Amino acid sequence: MSQARASHSVSLHDIAMHYGNIRAVDGVNLDIRAGEFMTFLGPSGSGKTTTLKIIAGFLQQSRGELRIDGNIVRDPPHKRDIGMVFQNYALFPHMSAADNIAFPLKMRGVPKRIRQQRVHEALERVHLSDRAQQKPRQLSGGQQQRVALARALVFEPKVVLMDEPLGALDKQLRERLQLEIRRLQQALHITMIYVTHDQEEALVMSDRISVFNQGKLEQVGSGADLYERPQSRFVADFIGESNIFCGQWHGDYFESQDTRFAVAQAPADTGTYCLIVRPERLYLLRADAAIPAAHNSLAAQVSELIYLGSERKVVLQTANGHSLVCRQSVAQGELHWQPGDHVQVTWPISEGVLVRAS
Amino acid sequence: MMKLPLWLRAYGGMLVIFLLGPSLMIIPMSLSSGRTLRFPPPGYSWQWYETLLTSSLWLNAAQTSLRVGLLTALAATILGTLTALGLARGRFWGRNALQALVLSPMIIPLVLIAIATFAVFVRWRIAGSLWGLVLAHTVLALPFVVINVLASLRTVDRTLELAAANLGAGPLRCFAYVTLPLIMPGMLAGALFAFITSWDEIVVAIFLTSPRLRTLPIVMWGQLRTELDPTIAAAATLLTLLTTLIFALGLWLRQRQTA
């Protein structure tokens, strides 16, 4: 593995996968840049893994084009030069760790001496030099994961695909490997496409995230884009926690359950919208306190206090039964609310995002 | 472990005697010092084993059986493995019917197969030849290989084959480097069962052997009707031992696969 190598871009143009009437993937357009860490995020059945399998060549798309560096790809999987790490690692159980890693080199006719050298380097890179001769079942989950990663990288593929590779590992190990994978990806400047349903993992690792829902792309953007400027209710719901008020946009104000709110960016059309405010953007005032300028506010009652270590969560109920969540950093000081207190929930108008309801 | 009631243990013991008795009874009979086959023997000696291992009739028969058995095992293993692959991985019309057809020699009465095969082989002029017998035994042995290989194919994770393809192995190399090593225990177990099928077989052999081509079961059958001396008991004992050994090996292989 050389330190710097040419990276490759991947583009999907109107990719679709239909099984009879079921549209597993339904018209996905996406440009993945060379050297980018792109995550496909979505609930199960949203089409993210199907899209990944189409890129790998395991599935033939019903419609659309896949291009790598602008060239249409139609080869069978073994000629695509795309590395993949599978959910269950898919290590060959009858081969040692070193033989597993040597396999793609052997298939490419790399001479034995060079092969050994590169396997050695690959093992070193994933800190498994002392495990070279062990069979997969003699390795721990994390070690197997690293062998799978080394095997997918050793032949310098154009793109590396990862299908929920950390799903089976415990939280601590998962977090360590997330950083390890991200570091390798950046050091080698590899184009990587990573599938997960874990939004936190997506935020930690990705340059950009593609949010899948029901076979379609909901939104593509950086973690900050998705969190702070969600473009749909689904994205707001799926990434992080949200307070969502659904109602009507009347042209100059937004009304939800008989309460009027001001909005920072007015949509052009009237209709049904949802106002989204992140829990950490809310703050609480006494019921008789004056509302600052350029803030929305809402009367509510504290119903629950939850301590989360660095943060605490205040759960509130409005008069008409709507439940709200407010997060406060513990560093901000003592909390002086008790369950049952009447308060005003307020937030700066600029912190609310209005999106179409559907 | 649960303590079993006395009657159940007695019943189990009787069942074991019922199943194993005839095979075990032959052992003292083969060690007889007398001149005829009877139980219990009048005294003990190794003389009949000596007769057996120096008789050209028995040794030729053993050699023929071994040759037919090994060729049958080889042919059945190759054909059976390919058949199992097709049945497990193929998506084609009539797959279930084909599977039933391949396994049918296990249910169809042997004598029917023997008569039909004989009629055809006479016309083809291969009745009484080594290759004719191997061909017929291969048909009988095929289901055992197919069943064993199908079972081991089911334990092979399909994503391993996807991984091999992803890493640059075309279909043939994927089979050679990944699938084949993983189903090897199933193939070996199938080959052993195929060998035993041929080694023990008499019904089809009665029709397809000739004075110049005689397998062990055929010679035993002939001796039993004419001579009735304890050599046959010695031969039967050795056969039982060998068969038991091979079966144990086959079971061990299968167990290793699932473990």
Image (cartoon, helix red, strand yellow):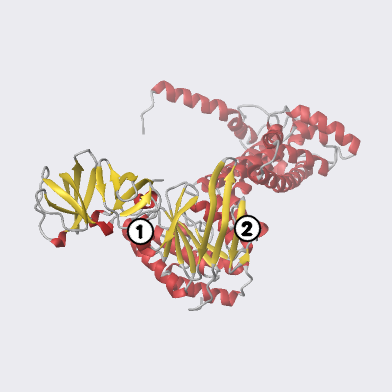
Q: Amino acid at mark 2?
A: Cys
Disc 1 marks which residue? A229
**Quarter placement of the C terminus of chain A:** top left
* Chain ID, mark 1: A
Cα separation, mark 2 vs mark 1, equals: 47 Å
Dots 2, 1 in contact, CB < 8 A = no
Q: Quadrant of residue B96?
A: top right
Residue B160: image location, x then y, percent: 55, 55
Give above or below for A1 relative to A238.
below
Q: Which mark is residue B174?
A: 2
Furthest residue in direction bottom, as rendered: A3
Observer-nearest of A115 and A62: A62
- Could you tell me which residue is drawn at 82 percent across and 35 percent down? B208
Give above or below for A1 relative to B130.
below
Residue A309: image location, x then y, percent: 19, 57
As helix, strand or loop, the secondary structure at mark 2 comes to: helix
Q: Is residue A119 visible?
A: yes
Residue A241: image location, x then y, percent: 29, 52
